Image (cartoon, rainbow, N blue to C red):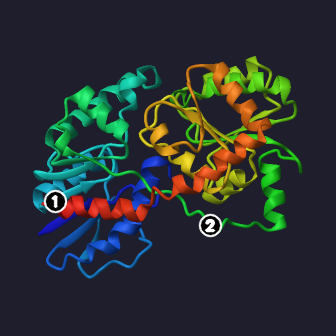
Amino acid sequence: MVVGIDASRYGHQEATGVEWYSFHLLNELIPLLGREHNTEVRLYAQNDFQPKADLPFNVRKRVIPFPRFWTVLRLSAEMVFKPVDVLFVPSHTLPMFAPKKSIITIHDVAFKHLKDSYSWFQLWLLNRSTKKAVKKAWKLIVPSEATKLDLINFYRCDADKIVVIPHGSPEIQPFERWSEQEVQSYKEQFFMKDRDLFILYVGRLETKKNLKRLVEAFSRFSVEFAGWKLILAGKRGLGFEDIWKKVLELKLEKSVFAPGYVTEREKSFLLENCRIFAFPSLYEGFGLPVLEAFAHRKPVLTSKTSSMPEVAGNAAFLVNPEKVEEISVGLKRLASDGVLVTQLVGKEEAQLRKFSWEKAAQATYHTLFGF
């Protein structure tokens, strides 16, 4: 038997959600593939990459460069001329020509809930690729029950085709430590003083992340908690201009900062030093940043919609993301109620232990070979 795995999202330099999923999952999955002695496994990528683990004897990289539309054109051609029995695609799009036993991960269908957050072309493309996946894939992996229900409700997907495999969580310990030189450099980079108190958001800066309401809530919060800052860390996406217009409108440009994409080490530093982690997203297929904040023992405010309650459990302060006042009150509670913060943070470790990339890889492995 021959199994193909799309590894094109592995090891991106400025990785975001899908890339981190591919990176962590494949790191744990690759060693498991060595169990299949009678199976050849091909890892497809557009550019050469170096997996974290040594490749088992039956696993080979297959680097097939192509300038554009790599999945739709180049990987499709590969499936025609060098077919496989099973294909696993950890992202959102199947190649035009794929084997009957194709398995794809659908991370979310946010575009169905938040159409104004996407261009018409993005909506068309995402809807088309999801329809195709639901129709043609042998199995669909989703990271949450919320995404499973969306596929059933929006696409009438057969529930038996859907396998819920939650993402993993970051390591609980040990935390990174930084040299005095690094600390000083980061403080300058993020406009931090020695005793600054700040609220942190990490993720793409775009409309569906609900950052305009977070900025409004921070403005109300600042009336009682003067001197605090809000750091919005991440790449700028669709709608960033409106988010920053709100910052200027509320005259918060001296207390709200958008430093752009942050490396893993920079993100870890910010998480270690923030007082509150705020993630009031309108929709998430999983919400990995919540677990990252848990790993740093920070009180978390997040939404009580889509997958966030599954991820956060009872270890976060949940709010209606469409109500600015709820977000503001939640921030105030987490900034002032030490008993509440202690209770929430005390529950984070148990919630973290429900998720692991090892478990995710084991479940994915059994999905690939469980027929």
Q: Nearer the viewer, residue 356 or 240?
A: 356
Mark 2 residue crowding within 10 angstroms, few (<14) / some (14–19) / many (20+): few
Q: Is residue 47 visible?
A: no
Up/down of 248 relative to 302, above or below: above
Return the residue at label 1.
Answer: 86
Give above or below for 220 relative to 168. Answer: above
Of residue 250 and residue 138, the one placed in the foreground of this image is 138
Residue 94, given in percent of the width and then of the height, sits at 23, 46
For label 2, the SS is: loop
Report the residue at 18% width, 80% height from top.
37
Look at mark 2 in the image and give the residue it sits on.
173
Left-right relation of 149 to 78: right
- SS at circle 1: strand
State the quadrant of the N terminus. bottom left
What's the distance in space between the residues labelled 1 and 2, CA to CA? 37 Å
The quadrant in which residue 25 appears is bottom left
User: Total of numbered circles in the picture?
Assistant: 2
Residue 249, position in %: x, y? 74, 17
Amino acid, disc 1: Val
Q: Amino acid at mark 2?
A: Gln
Give me the residue at 64% from left, 68% from top.
174
In this view, which residue lies farthest toward the top?
249
